[in-house]
Image (cartoon, grey):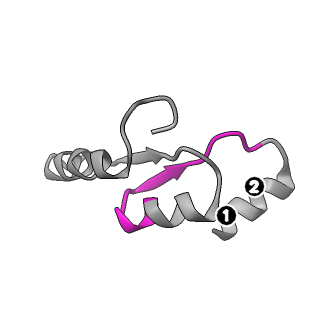
Amino acid sequence: MEHGHGGISDALPCLHALAATGTAAILRVLESSATWAKKALDLSPQGIMFPMIDSAEFAIDVVSF
């Protein structure tokens, strides 16, 4: 979602299609924030990729989301 035109509502059918094939889904969110982390977690991907993590302190914050 970071570089594409799709959003959360577009991700759900893609995640369903991947789940039907047994393929793990990694969802790349638009920004590294608690709001986007929660939206992504609601969709239940197997992983979330956060953009622009440039320090250990910020990585710790993002993991806490």
Q: Residue 4 location in percent, x, y?
A: 43, 30
* Residue for point 20% across, 49% down: 13
Residue 35 lies in the magenta stretch? no
Asked if 39 appears above or below 29 in the picture, the reply is: below
Q: Secondary structure at mark 2?
A: helix
Q: Dot 2, crowdedness within 10 Å: few (<14), some or many (≥20)?
A: some
Q: Residue 18 location in percent, x, y?
A: 22, 46
Question: In the rendered structure, which segment of residues is drawn in magenta?
Answer: 40-53
Q: Is residue 23 left or right of residue 25?
A: left
* Amino acid of disc 2: Ala
> 17 or 6, which is in the foreground?
6
Which residue position holds label 2?
59
* Residue for point 39% across, 68% down: 42
Q: Residue 16 location in percent, x, y?
A: 19, 53
What is the CA distance from the residue labelled 1 to the residue labelled 2?
Answer: 6 Å
Asked if 6 appears above or below 8 in the picture, the reply is: above
* Amino acid of disc 1: Val
Q: Is residue 4 left or right of residue 33?
A: left
Q: Quadrant of the N terminus?
A: top left
Contact, CB < 8 Å: mark 1 with mark 2? yes
* Residue for point 26% across, 53% down: 12
Residue 42 lies in the magenta stretch? yes
Q: Which mark is residue 63?
A: 1
Q: Secondary structure at mark 1?
A: helix
Q: Which mark is residue 21?
A: none
- Residue at the limit of the structure toward the left, as seen here: 20
Q: Quadrant of the C terminus?
A: bottom right
Q: Residue 33 location in percent, x, y?
A: 64, 58
